[in-house]
Structures are given as C-alpha cells and as structure tokens.
Image (cartoon, grey):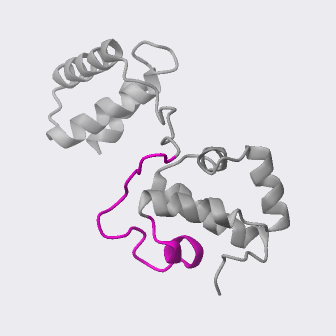
Amino acid sequence: MSTRNATSPADFQQVIDRLKEVLALPTNKAVAELLGLTASNLGERKNRAALPVEQIEQLCRQRGIRLEWVFDGLQPALESGGLRVEEGAPPAYSRPLAPPLDRDLMSACIEAVEVALELGGQRLPADRRARLVGALYEFSLPQGQVNRKALPILLSLADG
C-alpha cells in the first residue's frame, strides 16, 4: 500500500524517516525546514496523517530521490546519478551534525593514549589505537580537556 495518502501517523513517520535517511538529516524539524514547513506544522500534519505530498514530490525531484522509495520503500532510494541539488532547491541542512573538531583536544588525546600505552607496555594495532583515541576524545569533549578517569577504563577495554 502506498503511503502517499498516509492513513496513520505511523505511515506518515515512515515517509519522514526515509527522507531523513536519504538526506542525512537528524530530526523531523530539519525535514520540515527543507519542505518549507515549521516543525509544529509538520507535527500537526502527522497527527492528521496529512502528508505534504506536493512539497515532498518537489524536494524529491530537486534532489534526485525516487518517489517510489519515499512513499513505498521500493529500492533504490536515488535515481541514477545520485543525490543532487538543482538551482532553486532549498539549502541542505546547514547546522553541523557534530561539533567542530577541537584540534588541541584531539592532539592531547593522541598524546595521552600514546604515553599510556608506552608506560603500560601495551601494543595495539593502528585501527584499535585510533578507536581508543576517538573514544577518549568523545569522553573528553564535555570537559574540554583529556578525561584522565576514562583513560584507564578505555585502555582496559581496548586490551581485551
């Protein structure tokens, strides 16, 4: 059954979720913005199961997204040629999905991991060492400095 004429909020959300997936958008609000709607308007439409079909069709035409995929889940998601932006298309989601890289903190995390491995006599393959640095960085971001409490825990996990 096509969800072009959604019969429930769940059908409606499937369409929005497919748009979020193909456009790498984090929220319904981001989809609403690309469709030229407010988040509250999109929420009201969801409660009524009233898809903004015209706006969705226009966005899909502009971006090279197959309507059959958006409305029915039929693969592939993109037309041949991939995702595109035509002149006059709404701008892509402009807010960063992740905070910008704190280079000083990343350097400090790399150094902390290297020193800890050396002091502990541990040897890790490059890919595991990189994951360890990444995890330490994520734990350290809220404080803005290397999280020394998390380092031994992460080291024990990386060694196992």
The N terminus: image quadrant: bottom right
Q: Is residue 18 left or right of residue 79?
A: right
Quarter residue 127 falls in: top left
Residue 38 colored in magenta in the image: no
Q: Is residue 158 above or below residue 9?
A: above
Counting the numbered discs, the total is 0
Q: Is residue 142 left or right of residue 54?
A: left
Residue 67 colored in magenta in the image: yes
Q: Position of residue 6 (x, y in %)?
A: 73, 75
Q: Is residue 34 above or below residue 61?
A: above
Query: Mostly what secondary structure, the magenta segment?
Result: loop
Q: Residue at x 46, y 57 (%)?
A: 62
| Nearer to the camera, 85 or 117 | 85
Q: Position of residue 48 (x, y in %)?
A: 85, 65
Q: Which residues are magenta?
A: 65-89
Q: Position of residue 144 (x, y in %)?
A: 46, 13
Q: Residue at x 48, y 63 (%)?
A: 61
Q: Name the outermost residue toward the bottom.
A: 1
Q: Residue at x 48, y 36 (%)?
A: 97
The C terminus: image quadrant: top left
Q: Position of residue 142 (x, y in %)?
A: 52, 20
| Nearer to the camera, 51 or 98 | 51
Q: Residue at x 66, y 45 (%)?
A: 29
Q: Name the outermost residue toward the front.
A: 88
Q: Is residue 78 left or right of residue 54?
A: left
Q: Is residue 146 above or below residue 84?
A: above
